[in-house]
Image (cartoon, rainbow, N blue to C red):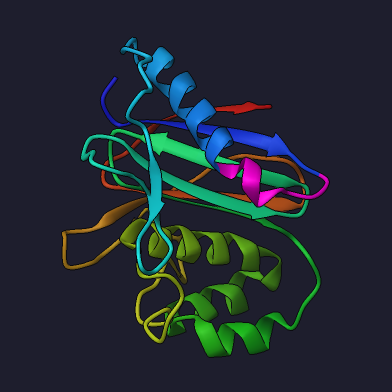
């Protein structure tokens, strides 16, 4: 079951950051069980890089990403590097935001297909910068996740590319995964 990604989604009224590590470790236990592995957790510790990417300390074979928006908090765990973003659709100045943050190809896509696809592009971009661990910075508009033909399946980068996978979710939300290889995705609600 190589290239498996487990996404655990929590419904929240208000997310309590103090519960975050417990939720991550609970998701890790579920992932290890799914993979048929040992559910030993004595050494599992979560830390964040200088740019905020969560990781398991001392491990190179388990990766995680978290995201929250609206009424949901989500955690993805995988045996490959992973970036996850979930976004509640809300009103906004999409044209102005896309001019500031999006690549020309993404703006062309939205102009052709409509700004109701804005959050599909946004979650793809966010999942990529979570995957790379760079976060939103001045390079956010230097890569693209969509073009005139539609959403891209792969973002080209110095490592050879990253795979984008739109994850079906509730109406009014967009969710996207970014991984090294095409993933086998399992989702469940808590």
Rendering coords of residue 110 (x, y %) = 59, 74
Q: Is residue 1 left or right of residue 115?
A: left
Question: Is residue 127 shown above or below 44?
Answer: below
The span picked out in magenta is: 13-20
Residue 23 or residue 45, whichever sits in front = 45
Image quadrant holding the N terminus, namely: top left
38 versus 131 height, above or below: above
Closer to the camera in the image, 17 or 95: 17
Whether 32 is among the magenta residues is: no
Q: State the image quarter where residue 73 is shown.
A: top right
Q: In screen coordinates, is 41 left or right of 75? A: left
Residue positioned 58% across, 34% down in the render: 23
Identify the image quadrant of residue 4. top left
| 188 left or right, relative to 13 | left
Q: Residue at x 35, y 16 (%)?
A: 40
Q: Position of residue 104 (x, y in %)?
A: 45, 85
Q: Is residue 80 left or right of residue 173?
A: left
Residue at figure coordinates x 73%, y 41% from the top left:
170
Q: Is residue 15 magenta?
A: yes
Q: Where does the image place residue 179, in percent across and percent down from the top left?
A: 33, 47
Of the pair 84 and 55, the residue shown nearer to us: 55
Q: Please tell me whether residue 166 is drawn above or below residue 109 in the rendered image.
A: above
> Measured from the top left, where is residue 101 in percent x and y?
52, 83
Point out the image quarter for the C terminus: top right
On the question of residue 186 being in view, the answer is no
Reply above or below: 20 against 135: above
Residue farthest toward the front in the current orientation of the protein: 42
Q: Residue at x 63, y 63 (%)?
A: 119
Q: Is residue 4 visible?
A: yes
């Amino acid at each position: 079951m190589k290239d498996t990604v487990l996404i655990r989604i929590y419904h929240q009224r208000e997310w309590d950051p103090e519960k975050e590590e417990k939720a991550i470790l609970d998701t890790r236990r579920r992932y290890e069980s799914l993979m048929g592995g040992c559910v030993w957790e004595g050494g599992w510790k979560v830390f964040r890089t200088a740019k905020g990417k969560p990781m398991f300390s001392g491990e190179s074979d388990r990766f995680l990403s978290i995201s929250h928006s609206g009424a949901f908090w989500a955690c993805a765990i995988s045996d490959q590097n992973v970036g996850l973003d979930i976004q509640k659709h809300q009103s906004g100045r999409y044209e102005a935001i896309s001019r500031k943050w999006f690549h020309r190809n993404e703006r062309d896509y939205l102009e052709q297909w409509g700004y109701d696809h804005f959050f599909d592009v946004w979650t793809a971009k966010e999942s990529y910068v979570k995957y790379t661990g760079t976060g939103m910075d001045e390079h956010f508009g230097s890569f693209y996740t969509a073009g005139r033909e539609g959403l891209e399946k792969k973002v080209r980068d110095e490592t050879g590319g990253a795979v984008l996978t739109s994850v079906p979710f509730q109406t009014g939300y967009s969710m996207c995964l970014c991984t090294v290889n095409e993933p086998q995705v399992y989702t469940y609600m808590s």
